[in-house]
Amino acid sequence: MAKLTVDGIEVEVPNGASVLQACEAVGVEIPRFCYHERLSVAGNCRMCLVEVEKAPKPIASCAYPVADGMVVRTDTAMVRQARRGVMEFLLINHPLDCPICDQGGECDLQDQAYSYGMDHSRYAENKRAVKDKFLGPLVKTFMTRCIHCTRCIRFSTEVAGISELGATSRGESMEVGTYIEKALTTELSGNMIDICPVGALLNKPYSFVARPWELRKTDSVDVHDALGSNIRVDARGSEVLRILPRVNDDVNEEWLGDKSRFSHDGLKRRRLDKPWVRHDGRLHAATWPEAFTAIAAKLRGLAPDRIGAIAGDLCDAESMMALKDLMAGLGSHNVDCRQDGALLDAGRRDFYTFNTSVAGIDEADAILLIGTNPRREAPVLNARILRRRGLGGCPVATIGQRANLTYDTEHLGDGPDAIAGAAEWFGAAKRPMVIVGQSALRSPGVLAAAWSLAAASMTADWHGFNVLHSAAARVGAMDLGFLPGPGGKPLPEMMHGGVDLLWLLAADEFDTAAIGPDTFVVYQ
């Protein structure tokens, strides 16, 4: 530990910490553009300059390590003048776009220009202009506003794992972009919008839609994968306009997948707003009493074992419990939540949960992925595995279909037989993780084999068996026991004529064309 003084306050921080981190530890705010706590240190914006006693000039606090006995001052005349100078240089080529820039109201450059800048400019030459880059349908660019902080470049390489962005030329001629113009291929591209400190990278679907102070902000949890990323829903009136991540170090840190961020447009298109009843092969609008009468008429006279229900991947627990109670009241045990055919075991809760926790990945010393592609199924989780592997001491292996996960892996085999041989690959690992995906759980015996493999290394403080679900509601449904009861029929049997009435609770992720032609379907 190093002991130093910041603005007269003594503080003790770990060796290797930066001066900026020491300043934050005592509550002193240091302006910055290039520094981000989850990215490597670039030290190129120089906005974080502070004065260190006996140093000949101000130092970049983000890149300068602390030392025992160091005396730091953050609000002297030298520091204020240095920050004004840096801000003046940054604004030389920055356009006066604030009134029309979507970043207005939540722009780091705007805020820090007010706090640390000058009230006039001495620059009288022409400003530079940069051609905007095409980065795909999600990220909009205004590269003339770019201040070359390189946050997006470092995010692309270090967090997303794909070196798609880079810098060409030097000095005033430097440009950030893809070397060959193309759309970004990472599933995390929207996070570059969040970390950009200016209006150079913007949310294209949200472009010119609203100002941040017009929006009603609601904390929520993402349901597009089973990770449970913390999100903030921004709405105006009854319309959702954008989704942003919230910080939760134990789950998604501050990242969010593109599917979760940009799919909110589906909330306002092709939504059911009234009941519909099918007559003569066509759907007709109906009143609620007419819809309930049609259901009651079909239920009347049906045997309990000819009635079934399937819960969808996005259902809330309250609705699933209500439907389960309805089925129980009708005497039916034909309920199921496993639309993908996964052979999950509800005998013990840790048979179907992610027991290590997402944050536990940071403690793993070997990771085995069985029948899963986390880059597609849970991109934020994949980014965490990438970071753990990059720190060293944690090899990653896969069993199943080969895939580009953005990091090096060892492929142990394609089928369930390879699981038995994975124990040798784990070797002397003390905290191995086994992550089983839904595609693997369609094969009998995979769950038991993966459990046996992980159980060999389980201790009182380490549980390495994990199931990575593809559905947000799956664990809740399993907890509620939304599974076939005694004598109950599983989903495949209900689909192929096993029931005469099938109640689908937002269940449309499977091939509904396979439902028997004589089956009466209630879709809610």
Image (tube, grey):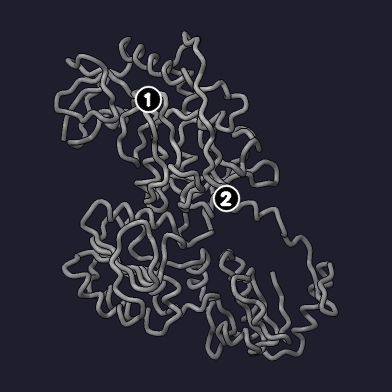
Q: Residues within 10 Å of mark 2 (few under 14, many from 20)?
A: some
- Decide which of 315, 137 is in the foreground and name it: 137
Q: Secondary structure at mark 1?
A: helix
Which disc number belongs to residue 213?
none
Residue 334 versus residue 378: which sits nearer the camera? 378
| Residue 106 in the figure: left or right of residue 175 | right
Q: Against 324, is 270 above or below?
A: above
- What percent of the width, then of the height, locates residue 239? 68, 46
Please state which of the two labelled residues, at mark 2 or mark 1, is closer to the viewer.
1
**Above or below — where is 346 with respect to 154?**
below
Residue 488, percent across and down?
Answer: 56, 87
Quarter of the view holding residue 506: bottom right
**Residue 462, horizontal then vertical, whole percent:** 26, 64
Q: CA distance from mark 2 to mark 1?
A: 35 Å
Q: Is residue 463 visible?
A: no
Q: For the point 40% across and 69% down, which residue is it? A: 467
Q: Which of the 4 image quarters holds residue 369?
A: bottom left
Q: Residue at x 56, y 41 (%)?
A: 203
Of labels 2 and 1, earlier in sequence is: 1
Q: Quadrant of the C terminus?
A: bottom right
Quadrant of the rendered image containing residue 431:
bottom left
Q: Is residue 34 above or below residue 324?
A: above
Residue 207 x/y as whole percent: 62, 38
Q: Which mark is residue 262?
A: 2
Where does the N terminus fall, quadrant-wise? top left
Residue ID for mark 1: 171
Q: Nearer the viewer, residue 475 or 289?
A: 475
Q: Is 418 on the left or on the right of 335, as rendered?
A: left
| Dot 1 amino acid type | Gly
Quick one: SS at disc 2? helix
Is residue 445 in view from this perspective? yes
- Residue 363 lies, with reference to residue 456, above or below; the image says above
